[in-house]
Amino acid sequence: AQSVTQLGSHVSVSEGALVLLRCNYSSSVPPYLFWYVQYPNQGLQLLLKYTTGATLVKGINGFEAEFKKSETSFHLTKPSAHMSDAAEYFCAVSPGGYQKVTFGTGTKLQVIP
Amino acid sequence: GAGVSQSPSNKVTEKGKDVELRCDPISGHTALYWYRQSLGQGLEFLIYFQGNSAPDKSGLPSDRFSAERTGGSVSTLTIQRTQQEDSAVYLCASSFTARGGAGELFFGEGSRLTVL
């Protein structure tokens, strides 16, 4: 069984500041890890994913995440927040293959001008 | 190409009525999920279909909720005797899965259900 914990249901940052959204996972097998973003009144879309290989993954809109096996973490970062980054962010884990994806509870990011 | 399509986009119903929500996944996608997103809440997993396997119904909140997937494609989520707490956005997602991989989920825009 797998699970995902997102620390902080709400995060506020100033425009131009570092964005750090935390995600820790639990998985009995090497995981596949995802970050999805949901802009206001829209569906979810993939931001980035880790499958195998390089542990630093780059996604759309300047976001990146690093898979740290020793810490069972997959935190999402962006060096400089933009107003358009205000959205809800969901971390997800999958054992791969035909098994289902499990989502965290989400983190709402507010960007303050 | 066409994405995941959900209908209706909005549904207002009276308490006690039955509703059906439809999801058309991306052609060729073997996996299909239903989630519920209540106001201010995260994603609540409802049900997962994978190919011809028995669906994972572990997230259905009560026996008033059911879902089927016909011919491995279109899925219908049915809520019987709706209650006000059923008001939410119901999201459908599909993905192509294969042994040894983990496909990206593609989400529809959701069906917003309001129970009066």
Image (cartoon, coloured by chain):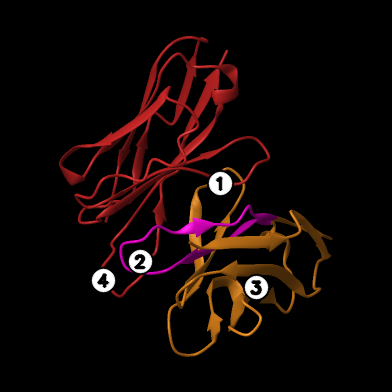
| Element assignment for label 3 | strand
User: Which residue occupies the foreground of this view, B39 or A69?
Assistant: A69
Q: Which numbered mark, 4 or 3, is in the foreground of this view?
A: 4
Question: What chain is tagged by disc 3?
Answer: A
Quick check: marks 3 and 1 in contact, CB under 8 Å? no
Which label number is shown at residue B99?
4
Q: Name the tint of chain B in the rendering.
A: red
Q: Residue furthest left?
A: B71
Question: What chain is tagged by disc 4?
Answer: B
| Element assignment for label 1 | loop
- Residue A97: image location, x then y, percent: 32, 68
Mark 3: few, some, or many residues within 10 Å (few <14, many ≥20)? many
- The amino acid beneath tag 1 is Leu
Question: What chain is tagged by disc 1?
Answer: B
Question: What chain is tagged by disc 2?
Answer: B
| Element assignment for label 2 | loop
CA gap between label 2 and label 3 equals: 20 Å
Q: Please give the residue where the numbered disc 1 appears in the rendered image.
A: B43
